[in-house]
């Protein structure tokens, strides 16, 4: 360890902005995936009782890809940097797959073949999104000092939510300007297909901007500011890293388990839940269901906008843990309200409350963990491994989804209450976190 480290310089607002701007495009892709996957697979003919199994692939790819990207990028030094090459390759892959996935039902295949093709495309899409997403978190860990880290992740959170708003609104917007929102049975509507096309275009433009504007440090400069030498960073394997991880890594991970299991059930069942409670149907072939799918996108966008506002308020709390726990409790209340709201406009209220939890989930875990990891080295590898606290709970929730769905009576809307309970459990787990104080 270098005892004569130079303090990382403060970065201007625009330099912090440029570090994360590409996240805007990546998040549009992620919003299109999370907001439309269940809708796409239900349109292709998936059974609601097995719907959660289609959601195993995204977190499974995340838990495999992000540690690999983190570890490899720790050891990568190129003219473009160590993180940006992975960002660019991931984004290029995502663009290609975004043009294929929504067309799964348009190639004349049988229902089973279309579902398999869609699953394969989803696997590639989530692999590429994870590959493009992880470098942004690592860039902040590499180049931003502790004092500015919360600000940097707040900017990232803002861009994340802004991208979410755009991605979630696309199907509603394209329906509004005249694209068809209904299609032959088993075929995804044009409003969704063109949402993926335009999202892919914005993604690559945003990543090109970040690639042009961000200049990563060379090895010598990096060693000046970071506490572990490159040679030492190359020695530890993942099991050793996990064994030596600070307690905060695991305690925040427990909170993450409850939070991301809750989010998995939302992404899986919320289109059907909104369609069931507001439009009175879960028939995926009906026009009402597709209208509900568009409106769910609007509600997701409202959730993201509420999250932006709440994220701006979070720094005003003197007690960070209390702010984290309160945010999760508000989100839990929002989930629990969904089955009891039968007006599409009043449904805005639960999603605004869910947005409070989403704001905290995006920024606070990485602030706690990256502060705790100072002096440990292997920042990219650790953040890749920490992504397991996002992926593992989703995999567990997806595997248990069919059982839980039957347990609560086979109603998609009741699954939202399950999500609410999980967020409250996450709020309780926040009390175990010990925050590292920084200058």
Image (cartoon, rainbow, N blue to C red):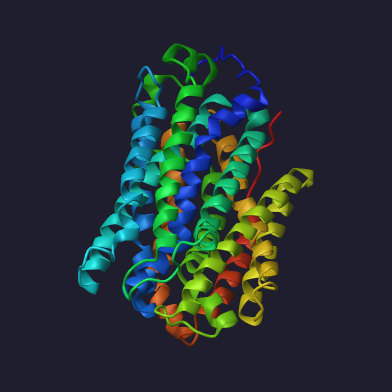
Image-based side of 348 in relation to 34, left or right: right
The answer to which image quadrant residue 230 occupies is top left
Q: Where residue 272 sits: x, y (%)? A: 49, 76
User: Is any atom of residue 77 visible in this view?
Assistant: yes
Q: How many marks?
A: 0
Residue at (61, 55) in percent of width and height: 358
Relative to 231, say whether 160 is above or below: below
185 relative position to 415: left or right = left
Seen as rendered, the residue at the extreme bottom is 409
Residue at 52% across / 45% down in the picture?
249
Instruction: Tell which residue pokes out farthest to the front in this image.
Output: 178
Please give left or right for residue 267 compared with residue 321 in the image: left
Residue 226, placed above or below residue 263: above
Q: Is residue 354 above or below residue 417?
A: above
Q: Say which residue appears at 68% left-offset and 62% top-offset.
A: 352
Q: Residue at x 66, y 72 (%)?
A: 347
Asked whether 62 or 180 is in front, the reply is 180
Q: Residue 293 location in percent, x, y? A: 50, 69
Percent of width and height locating residue 404: 45, 78
Name the one closer to the observer, 170 or 41. 170
Residue 169 point in image, percent of width and height: 55, 57
Looking at the picture, does residue 3 appear above or below residue 376? Answer: above
Residue 140 visible in this rendered orientation of the protein: no
Identify which residue, 157 or 74, lies in the foreground: 157
Residue 159 placement: quadrant: top right
Q: Considering the image in quadrants, where does the C terminus appear?
A: top right
């Amino acid at each position: 360890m270098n005892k004569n480290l130079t303090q990382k310089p403060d970065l201007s607002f625009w330099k912090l902005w440029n570090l994360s701007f590409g996240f805007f495009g990546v998040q549009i892709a992620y919003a299109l995936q999370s907001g439309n996957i269940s809708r796409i697979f239900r349109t292709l003919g998936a059974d609601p009782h097995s719907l959660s199994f289609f959601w195993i692939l995204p977190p499974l790819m995340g838990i495999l890809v992000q540690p690999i990207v983190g570890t490899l990028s720790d050891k990568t030094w190129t003219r473009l940097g160590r993180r940006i090459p992975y960002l660019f390759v991931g984004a290029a892959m995502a663009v290609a797959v975004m043009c294929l996935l929504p067309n799964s039902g348009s190639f004349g295949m049988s229902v089973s073949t279309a579902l398999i093709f869609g699953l394969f495309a989803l696997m590639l899409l989530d692999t590429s999104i994870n590959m493009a997403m992880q470098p942004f978190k690592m860039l902040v860990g590499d180049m931003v000092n502790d004092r500015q880290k919360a600000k940097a992740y707040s900017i990232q959170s803002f861009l994340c939510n802004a991208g979410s708003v755009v991605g979630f609104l696309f199907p509603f917007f394209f329906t509004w300007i005249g694209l068809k929102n209904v299609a032959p049975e088993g075929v995804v509507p044009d409003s969704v297909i063109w949402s993926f096309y335009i999202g892919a275009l914005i993604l690559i433009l945003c990543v090109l901007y970040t690639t042009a504007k961000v200049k990563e440090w060379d090895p010598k400069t990096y060693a000046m500011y970071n506490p572990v030498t490159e040679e030492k960073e190359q020695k530890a394997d993942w099991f050793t890293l996990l064994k030596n991880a600070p307690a905060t890594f695991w305690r925040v991970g427990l909170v993450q388990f409850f939070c991301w299991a809750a989010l998995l059930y939302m992404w899986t069942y919320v289109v059907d839940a909104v369609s069931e409670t507001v439009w009175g149907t879960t028939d995926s072939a009906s026009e009402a269901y597709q209208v509900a799918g568009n409106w769910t996108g609007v509600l997701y966008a409202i959730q993201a906008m509420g999250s932006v506002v709440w994220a701006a308020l979070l720094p005003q709390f003197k007690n960070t843990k209390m702010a984290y726990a309160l945010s999760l409790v508000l989100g839990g209340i929002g989930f629990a309200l969904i089955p009891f709201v039968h007006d599409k406009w009043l449904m805005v209220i639960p999603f605004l409350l869910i947005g409070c939890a989403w704001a905290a989930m995006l920024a606070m875990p990485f602030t706690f963990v990256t502060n705790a990891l100072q002096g440990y080295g292997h920042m990219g590898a650790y953040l890749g491994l920490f992504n397991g606290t996002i992926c593992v709970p989703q995999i567990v929730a997806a595997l248990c989804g069919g059982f839980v769905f039957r347990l609560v009576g086979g109603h998609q809307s009741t699954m939202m209450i399950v999500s609410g309970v999980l967020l409250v459990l996450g709020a309780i787990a926040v009390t175990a976190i010990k925050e590292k104080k920084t200058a």
